[in-house]
Image: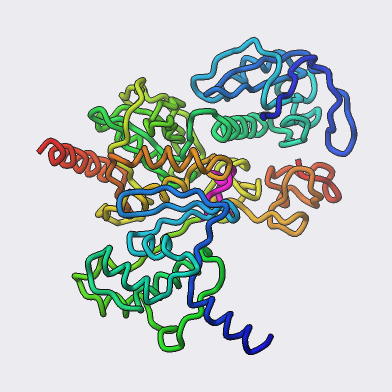
Amino acid sequence: MRHIEPLLPYTRTIRAGTETDVVDWVAGRSILAFGVRIGIRTNQPEILDRLSEYFPPLWKPTPVSHVERLFSLKIAGAGLAGNRLGFHELFEDLEPGTRSRSLNTVLEAFESRVKMYVAEMAPRRVFVHAGAVGWRGQAIIIPGRSMSGKTSLVTELVRAGATYYSDEYAVLDLRGRVHPYPQPLAIRDQFSFKQRKCRVEEIGGVTGRKPLPVGLVVVSKYKSGVRWSPRQLSGGRGVLELLANTVPARRNPDIVMTTLQEAVSEAKVVKGARGEAAETAAMILKQFGEREGQAKA
Amino acid sequence: MSVENVVQAREDSLLPDAKRENLVIRENPDELLVYDLSNHKAHCLNKSAALTWTHCDGKTTVGDLVAILGRELNVEVDEDVVWLALRQLDKARLLQGPVGRPEAIINRSRRDVVRKLGLGGALAVPAVMSIIAPKASAAVSANGTPCSTNTQCVSGCCDRQNAPIVCATDSGTGGSRRKTGVACSSNANCCSNVCVGAPTGTCA
């Protein structure tokens, strides 16, 4: 049984810092993302439109007043910039979370928390930390944690003609097929590591729409000067590699194991360090083509 | 412990018994996947390890397991193979209790067994691969890894003041960088680079 939190009425007593504080929640909305109902309320109605930039992709508004997770965003001062007037604060259900004078910091925390919550709780979907692209009717997925180089490889695969599915999560249905999670690519600056959001169309790519069976799993990490020369893993090892990057692995291992097994059942799983993303992307697509040729033969 | 009990314990340790509770088990071609709910570890057993494990019922002796493996894998195996499998299964905590290995084989390595079996017997070499299933929040980065925002770090603290920009240690007031709400004496103490009320303030 899932926890259900009422979004309305907006005014509730919450703990803010060390003092109990009453905040007038004057505006709010509920959304549905991958089957998860999320509520957001705030003391500043103007912020609601801006918040939608931080929602998970493919979200839809929903009229429900009861949600599974309620985020409360307390904006300091009168204006959105109000940095001089106090702290902006994010609460998750009734628990205090991020607190900062920088609104961007709080919004980034909101984005991270709401996406993580959806990834963990989505019914009938298994979220794996992985880049995903479509190529000749099958999906190539690249599991890996944050900063493992997923986005750079996905970007180069898309530049080479693959269809964009995600640079953060491979969203699997219970048949192991990959669904799109079309958020903008989060491209990092090489030196400052700051992320810049980039729509896939800006690099000449298109976003996939249909679910695809997995054809290739590439387990890889960037290593300077290395030429990609992976070794093939068994299906079982492939499941472990994906499981190590699966968000609801602990929450629902039964369904997760079955789903991952389905996902790799017809896929080739390869592992090995890689060098530059563009060179590796070309090699991946070449290897995929060879595999397809072998399958046809 | 009486002599009889010691003898009984010794005999029991030579009759390995597989753990059966709190497991999610999935069969793959020539492999077995096992998820242990008690410690959130997942294991992939190759055919040889899987055969050994599935026949560990507390009644089957090591000698019986040798015969079973030889028959099922269609290669000649000896006790070393079974003991290697039991050692790996024990390490993965997939057996009920510790397995009392004979002194003579305690130090025998996987490499020794592979060498002994040769190329033809490679299939019979047991292998158990294990991972710890991640927590849902494991997407965030460990200390010392590059970051751009605090939320990417386990510590909740991305040190943007010093190059390279990496997740910093945060251990309350003793960490190199401090989270929001923690006491600070200067801006340089804080992840946010803002210490409100310095020199006796709190990190913004």
Task: Give the extent of the magenta segment.
Answer: B132-142
Instruction: Judge whether residue B134 is colored magenta.
Output: yes
Q: Position of residue B11 (x, y in %)?
A: 52, 80
Q: Residue at x 40, y 37 (%)?
A: A131
Instruction: Judge whether residue A259 is colored magenta.
Output: no
Nearest the viewer among A59 and A5 is A5
Q: Position of residue A258 (x, y in %)?
A: 43, 40
User: Can residue A275 be seen from the camera position used here?
Assistant: no
Give the side of residue B123 with respect to residue A132, left or right.
Answer: left
Vertical order, B175 against B4 (above or below): above
Give the side of residue A154 with respect to residue A117, left or right.
Answer: left
Q: Position of residue A142 (x, y in %)?
A: 37, 42
Quarter where residue A185 is shown = top left
Q: Residue at x 43, y 44 (%)?
A: A190
Q: Residue at x 25, y 44 (%)?
A: A279
Quarter where residue A49 is shown = top right
User: Can residue A267 be seen from the camera position used here?
Assistant: yes
**Rendered-image quadrant of the N terminus of chain B:** bottom right
Q: Position of residue A93 (x, y in %)?
A: 74, 29
The residue sitting at the left extreme is A297
**Rendered-image quadrant of the C terminus of chain B:** top right
Q: Residue at x 45, y 65 (%)?
A: B56
Nearest the viewer among A51 and B85 is B85
Give the side of residue A297 with respect to residue A249, left or right.
Answer: left
Vertical order, A22 against A289 (above or below): above
Vertical order, B26 against A86 (above or below): below
Nearest the viewer among A93 and A124 is A124
